[in-house]
Image (spheres, grey):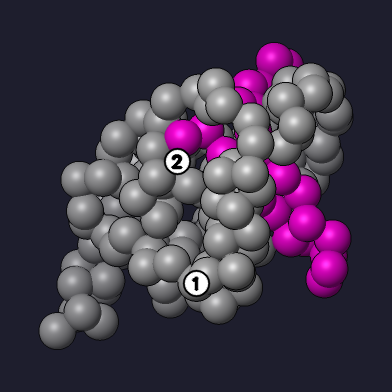
């Protein structure tokens, strides 16, 4: 459909919590398609509506080429105590990455584009991506999960790339 402009760090919008989706219909389908197009153009493996300045609880993932996963009003209802480390980044801060530790497995409740409710268990990289995108929907930009020292270092590196 349309590649939208991505909100760039440090825009205050990235700290804005998103509102639940209450209307399911053609506009939501268009938003989902725009998210997919924007994510692929970025490029990235996931993107939230907040990344394009739409503050609704929607995100998409494409962990395997051509397999789009869409999550509306997602909520983590259970997390494993076992953790894993993985390198993360954001379409809002391209080229900047750092390793984070998150639960290895999550159980997720969400809706699809029609409003139907689902539950799924995600492991490994899939679980990390879900947690990363839900953080963004909650207004928590991924670098907030880093120590202040690492966050400051990455912020300085990002600022240098923007000059």
The extreme top residue here reads 77
Residue behind mark 1: 3
Distance from label 2 to label 1 (Cα)?
20 Å
For the point 55% across and 51% down, the residue is 31
Left or right of 65 on screen, residue 146: left
Using residue 108 as the reference point, say whether residue 33 is left or right of it: left
Residue 114 on image: x %, y %: 75, 32
- Residue at 22 percent of width and 56 percent of height: 10
Q: Secondary structure at mark 2?
A: helix
Residue 57 is a magenta residue: yes
Quadrant for residue 46, please give it: bottom right
In magenta stretch: residue 155: no
Q: Is residue 160 left or right of residue 4?
A: left
- Which label lies toward us, 2 or 1? 1
Which residues are the magenta region? 56-85
Question: Could you say whether the residue bearing mark 1 is in a helix, strand or loop?
Answer: loop
Q: Is residue 13 left or right of residue 97?
A: left
Residue 66 shows up from this direction: yes
**Which label sits on residue 136?**
2
How many numbered circles does the render carry?
2
Quarter of the image with the C terminus in it: bottom left
């Amino acid at each position: 459909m349309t590649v939208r402009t991505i909100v760039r760090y440090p825009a205050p919008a990235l700290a804005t919590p998103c509102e639940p989706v209450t209307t399911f219909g053609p506009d939501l389908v268009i938003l989902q398609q725009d998210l997919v197009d924007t994510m692929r153009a970025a490029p990235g493996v996931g993107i939230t509506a907040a990344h394009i300045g739409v503050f609704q609880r929607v995100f998409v993932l494409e962990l395997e080429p051509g397999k789009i996963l869409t999550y509306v009003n997602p909520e983590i209802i259970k997390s494993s105590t076992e953790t894993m480390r993985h390198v993360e980044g954001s379409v809002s801060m391209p080229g900047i990455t750092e390793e984070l530790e998150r639960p290895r497995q999550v159980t997720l409740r969400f809706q699809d584009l029609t409003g139907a409710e689902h539950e799924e268990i995600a492991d490994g990289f899939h679980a990390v991506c879900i947690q990363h995108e839900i953080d963004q929907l909650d207004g928590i930009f991924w670098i907030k999960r880093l120590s202040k020292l690492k966050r400051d270092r990455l912020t300085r590196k990002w600022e240098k790339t923007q000059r």
